[in-house]
Image (spheres, coloured by chain):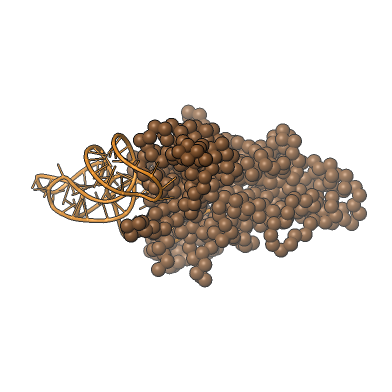
Amino acid sequence: MAEPKENLQMEKIVSLCKRRGFIFQSSEIYGGINGFWDYGPLGAELKRNVKELWWNSMTREREDVAGLEATIIMSPAIWKASGHVDTFSDPMCDCKKCKKRFRADQLCEDQNLTLSRNPEGKFVLPVGTRCTGCGSVELTEPRPFNLMFKTYVGPVESEDNVAYLRPETAQAIFAQFKNVLETSRQKVPFGIGQIGKAFRNEVTPRNYTFRSREFEQMELEFFIKPDEAIEAIHGAVATMPATGHPGEPQPDWGWQAWHRYWVEERVRFYEGIGLSRETLGFHHQTPEELAHYARACTDILFKFPFSKKDDHGNVKGDELEGIAARSDFDLSQHQRFSGKPMGVFDDELRAAWGKLSPEKQADLWKRYYDNRKNYLTKSARPGETAEQIQKQATEDANGLAKGQYIPHVIEPSAGVDRLILALIANAYSETVKTDAKGKSETVFVMKFHPRVAPIKVGVLPLLKNKPELVNKALAVRDLLRPWMNVFYDDSGSIGKRYARQDEAGTPFCVTIDFDTLGENPELLDTVTLRHRDDGRQERLKISELRDWLFTRTR
RNA sequence: GCGGGUGUAGUUCAAUGGUAGAACGGCAGCCUUCCAAGCUGCAUACGUGGGUUCGAUUCCCAUCACCCGCUCCA
């Protein structure tokens, strides 16, 4: 019962997006291209507003975050270090009988077999590999599924010139960590934020714009001290209440507090643009789901019309953002692959260390050593020996005692396009309206939060054929235009123009009428201000209009 | 990439083996003193490419895109 209804809801949203100019199919006149979408006039405004709000709240309005704008194409070595070149390239094969799809390497592993390559470098399934679904041995040849978009730098298309379009913006932040640290006058804990395009050659783009091959991310990498350093400096890592926002950042916060802090900060952001907690969902990744280097990851979900129900009939939602505690994995990888030190020197730690008891020193040293050894072992290169790893871990732990460490990181990583879709789905509402003649019709209103609304105010002369009204309305438009996105409309009846703005999600309309011109002298230079969601009207002075609107739309 | 479904104006839907209609929307004009009023006019479609046929939007094939599963996680 619910399924078709939800599809219908999604279809209505898709139709409205096209009709009102929020989202178009990319390259539509050539038949489209799978997994790519364009934003029309209203969508472009909506997206700009969202990105600007993120940028402002994450960087400009904070003391502890700096911004970055890196290139989309970077040295391919970055993607070696990050693991994307290897992990984003999975050999897949299909069962010809039951049509199930497998990752060939996992399929082999499950059966204690090994996937090998033939002399031409192609993957070959060992004889006797069976489909774990139906037991058939009729499997297609493994084909590599590479999610990285490849290109060539320079005019020669040779293997030496291969580069990739970034599959995430985060790695550039790690790669530029030292430069930002040195130029921004920040010190740990601090963050680097970036908004930008990312590209993934998805197997199956799905759910309208939700999974696209070209998309945009808003990512923060927030660098923190390892817990061992916090403990050395402050005696102990702060303990957290079980739930809720932990308040203003404190110097004795460990990774758990910072992780919680960013989850709650991000939820506040979503609430601030109209996504209430009830529309959101949360997923705390289980230890099995987590990447080996990650300590925790909380996903913030939105309940889309296409979101599936769980076994209990509850809608969990689909992911808008993941907030991961990634330990010191990323910077460590880049340190190892680039050979450039990614550690920082911490005066506080250095000063504090000397005052610790030898027992405490030994305890912290050992814990840091174990963590480093664990990391180095898991990321070992072929041929690296246990002795080499132990030597490096010892060096790292000795470094800690001198005030040196590789920062850990909390990563709130959000998808812009997913958020746009969530905002559209959330804003979409329809009501049946019955007019004076008893005729009822369904009307659409996009109830965007004024902060994200593509158009902030519609300026409407009550009548088009009275030049005095039109000229006054144009003057009001020009008064507001430098401050916000204004839409002027003088065609059709006033009701129709209100309705048009409702469909665009414009929170306010001002109407210039004969009272504005002084027909009623008391109302000279005032306008009708009409509210989108309830049709309420009030009278405002033109002189107060700009401030009134400005404070309510930002 | 595999399996299932879909494909007609901007949108939502019709009709038809003899080259397509409507409603809403859009544009222009008239009119209109606050919630899609009215009148006049205009524009816009058979996803693409082959085939069968005297003739295809209609039948067949391929392709592309969209939706639903397998995979993916911003």
Query: Which one of the lettered chains is coloured orange?
Result: B
Q: Residue at x 79, y 57 (%)?
A: A238
Q: Position of residue B34 (x, y in %)?
A: 41, 48
Q: Quadrant of the N terminus of chain A?
A: bottom left
Q: Answer left or right for B47 relative to A172.
A: left
Query: Which one of the lettered chains is coloured brown?
Result: A
Q: Position of residue A325 (x, y in %)?
A: 67, 53
Question: Which residue is nearer to you in this view: A1 or A449?
Answer: A449
Q: Residue at x 52, y 33 (%)?
A: A479
* Residue A497 shows up from this direction: yes
* Residue A168 shows up from this direction: no
Q: Based on the displayed image, in which of its 4 quarters is residue A441 positioned?
A: bottom left
Q: Position of residue A524 (x, y in %)?
A: 50, 37
On screen, residue A509 above or below A307: above
Q: Quadrant of the C terminus of chain A?
A: top right
Question: Which residue is nearer to you in this view: A258 or A130?
Answer: A258
Q: Answer left or right for B11 relative to A206.
A: left
Q: Residue at x 52, y 71 (%)?
A: A312
Q: Residue at x 48, y 29 (%)?
A: A156
Question: Which residue is nearer to you in this view: A528 or A532?
Answer: A528
